[in-house]
Amino acid sequence: QVQLVESGGGLVQAGGSLRLSCAASGRTFSSYIMGWFRQAPGKERDIVAAISWYGLNTYYADSVKGRFTISRDNAKNTVYLQMNSLKPEDAAVYFCAARCDRGPIARLPVDYDYWGQGTQVAVAS
């Protein structure tokens, strides 16, 4: 069983920055593909970014490329999402997810095995 706990959400002005963190339980964190998803009211949950088990490969949604950076610290069992140049359309609940697999980075919510409770990000225009 893996438990994921997100933190770092909040209210920020457009153009500002936030860093989300996701702390994971479990001894094999380095074996997990980790992803960040977001879900706005009335919309589907979409991938934002994902990172392979040793951080060698990353994926970003087109809407966040060049603004967001995903990283991980396997020694701390933590994955991060640095969000810069935030826009009102980035507002959503952000979820951390873990896929217990060492294969290619997965992009669909159904491909992930464990989820955090989510953290709210609000962006004021």
Image: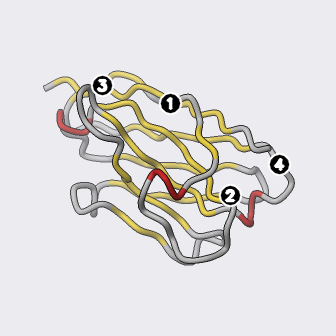
Sequence-earlier tag: 4 or 1: 4
Sequence-earlier tag: 2 or 1: 2
Residue furthest to the left in view is: 125
Q: Nearer the viewer, residue 101 or 89?
A: 101
Q: Which residue is the site of mark 3?
A: 122
Disc 4 to disc 1, C-alpha distance: 19 Å
Q: At numbered mark 1, what does the secondary structure look like: helix, strand or loop? A: loop
Residue furthest to the right in view is: 27
- Frontmost of labels 4 and 2 is 4
CA neighbours of label 2 inside 10 A, class few (<14), some (14 to 19), many (20+): some
Q: Which residue is the site of mark 2?
A: 73
* Residue at 86% across, 54% down: 27
- Are the residues tagged 4 and 2 within 8 Å (C-beta)? no
Q: At numbered mark 2, what does the secondary structure look like: helix, strand or loop? A: strand
Q: At numbered mark 3, what does the secondary structure look like: helix, strand or loop? A: strand
Q: Which residue is the site of mark 4?
A: 26
* As drawn, 17 above or below 59: above
Residue 69 falls in image quadrant: bottom left
